Image (cartoon, rainbow, N blue to C red):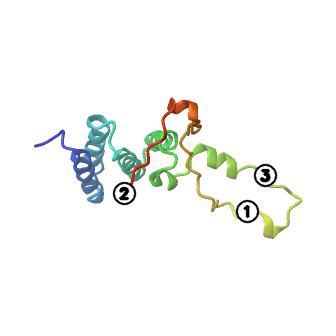
Amino acid sequence: NHPRHPLASNAQLHIGLSYLQQKEYKIAEEELTRVLLDHPYSNAIPDALGSLLKAAEAQGNASRVAYFREKLGNFFANAPQSQGSPSVDSVKHESTPHDSGKHESQKPSGHSTEKPVAPQPPTAPVPEMNSADLHGQQPSVVKQ
């Protein structure tokens, strides 16, 4: 009834999740795709993509599984939804030969326990102020 409501994308997501839980994969895909199309800037997009990935896996559709994994990895690499599905980069990293000079106890087990580091937002340097910037005025102090 209210498609522009701030929670409309979350409601649409839960409709799709309900069908996914009932193993109605085709209908779940339709409803979850509506989240992507109708609410492209929603915070529900990673959840919708992760659920679409699960629906594609359940149907055995390898091309769609690869597509949704790529989208999650490219656009939402730090989202928890993309952590469950290995990206192409992590698969390549795990398949590289290990240094033969290491002892068995030092070799990685194949499962990375490192968490991805979120990129830090850019910061601007704080401008320095001197008395010339105040044009001869004393700085005011706000008392609370």
Q: Camera-side residue: 43 or 110?
A: 43
Percent position (x, y) of residue 127?
Answer: 57, 36
Task: Check the picture and name the quadrant holding the C terminus.
Answer: bottom left
Q: Amino acid at mark 2?
A: Gln
Q: In this rendering, is residue 113 above or below 91?
A: below
Residue 52 lies, in percent from the top left, at: 37, 47
Which numbered mark, 1 or 2, is in the foreground of this view? 2
Q: CA distance from mark 3 to mark 2?
A: 63 Å
Name the quadrant of the N terminus: top left
Depth check: give the residue in front, 26 or 128.
Answer: 128
User: Could you say which is closer to the camera, residue 121 or residue 128?
Assistant: 128
Horizontally, residue 144 falls left or right of residue 6, namely right
Q: Which residue is mark 3?
A: 97
Q: Residues within 10 Å of mark 3 (few under 14, many from 20)?
A: few
Residue drawn at point x = 63 percent, y = 59 percent: 114
Give the CA distance from mark 1 to mark 2. 56 Å
Q: Could you classify mark 1 by the number of other residues whose Cα lies within 10 Å: few (under 14), some (14-19), or many (20 or more)?
A: few
SS label for mark 3 = loop
Which tag, 1 or 2, sits closer to the chain's start? 1
Q: Residue furthest bottom?
A: 105
Which residue is the site of mark 1? 108
